Amino acid sequence: MTRVLVTGGTGVLGQRIAQQLRARHATVVTLSRRAPAAPTPGLEWVPGDLITGAGLDEALCGVQAVVHAATSQRAREDVQMTQRLLDAAVRAKVEHLLYVSIVGIDHLSYFDYYAAKLEGERRVAASGVPYSVQRATQFHDFVAYLLGRMNRFPVLTLPRRIRLQPVDPDAVAARIAYATLNGVAGRLPDLAGPEAQSLETLAHAWLRAMGQRKRTWSVPMPLPIFRAMAVGDLAPAHAVRIGPSWEAWLAATVAGPGRAAADGAFP
Ligand SMILES: NC(=O)c1ccc[n+]([C@@H]2O[C@H](COP(=O)([O-])OP(=O)(O)OC[C@H]3O[C@@H](n4cnc5c(N)ncnc54)[C@H](OP(=O)(O)O)[C@@H]3O)[C@@H](O)[C@H]2O)c1
């Protein structure tokens, strides 16, 4: 049975990847600083810190494959964490490391988080560890979080000219679990949700799902993240389209009792 380490096993994506790997009969160990909210049968957790390297050698003991789904919004930390993991993976002779990245981050170096993700990809490729890189578009959860943060005034104020193709993290996790166990592939095809939409359209659907009758107002917002989102190719025509739409996800997650179905047809 393949033993897999998932870094960031308490994160939005990492916890889903760990479950998907378990469903595929892998032995799964996760590493994060905080313990998972509840112990999950069949999942081992090692407390660790990718900045200091604490717990890392223990977590990598006997591991054949690693999924790096831990991240820090502090760009410099994010690169440090990746490098620390790569150094340990070389020592542990890991056979396959899958790095999770973001669609459309090329040429956007003024937004330091995207620059860090690109540098992470570069370091993974140069590390000598056999690797795969899986890029995905913004998760539905992340778009909902962003809209929630912006929804502070009587009118929902949005950054202008942003077009996104958000994707369900359950569907991304299913693909990543499959790719991890399927072997080294280099850069995998980019993953996106089924539909590219303007942020205004996404916001209107979100407001409807939340039962709010607000108007939206789109204005220039010169923050690097919004500039990067406006000029980056975050809704690529070439991406593989997976998972439920934004509207279906909202109906199941925000407005409804259950979860939208993930990409269930995927092996
Ligand atoms: N969110 C999106 O829309 C999106 C879209 C495409 C790709 N991605 C990529 O997908 C990956 C996962 O993103 P996510 O949204 O799931 O992240 P997240 O929810 O913020 O989770 C981050 C994880 O990293 C762990 N972590 C942070 N600092 C750590 C440290 N020093 N040592 C060990 N663990 C640490 C956290 O656990 P502790 O805090 O407990 O340590 C947590 O489990 C990232 O590479 C991201 O760039 C995200």
Image (tube, rainbow, N blue to C red):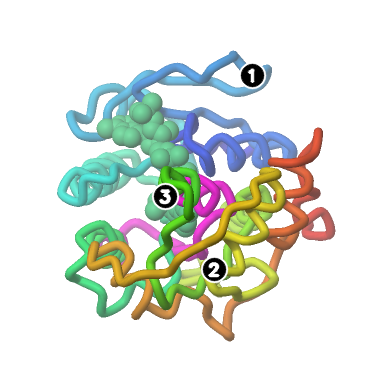
3 or 1: tag closer to the N-terminus:
1
**Where residue 153 appears, x then y in whole percent?**
42, 46
Give whichever of 165, 128 is nearer the camera: 165
**Residue position marked by numbered label 3 in the rendering:** 150
Q: Secondary structure at mark 3?
A: helix
The secondary structure type at the circle numbered 2 is helix
Which of labels 2 and 1 is toward the front?
Answer: 2
Which is more foreground, mark 3 or mark 1?
Answer: 3
Residue span colored magenta: 123-146
Residue sticking out furthest to the bottom: 237
Amino acid type assigned to the residue bearing label 3 in the image: Met
Q: Tell me the CA gap for discs 2 and 3.
A: 12 Å
- Residue under label 2, please give it: 200
* Residue 65 at x, y percent in the picture: 49, 45
**Mark on residue 210?**
none
Q: Quadrant of residue 27?
A: top right
- How many C-alpha atoms fall within 10 Å of the one at disc 3: few (<14), some, or many (≥20)? some
User: Which circle's residue, 2 or 3, is located before the other in the chain?
Assistant: 3
Please check the rendered image and state whether residue 140 is part of the magenta-colored stretch, yes or no.
yes
Q: Residue at x 42, y 58 (%)?
A: 157
* Quadrant occupied by the N terminus: top right
Q: Is the C terminus in the top left, top right, bottom left or bottom right quadrant? A: bottom right
Q: Which residue is mark 1?
A: 40
- Give coordinates of residue 195: x percent, y percent: 67, 73
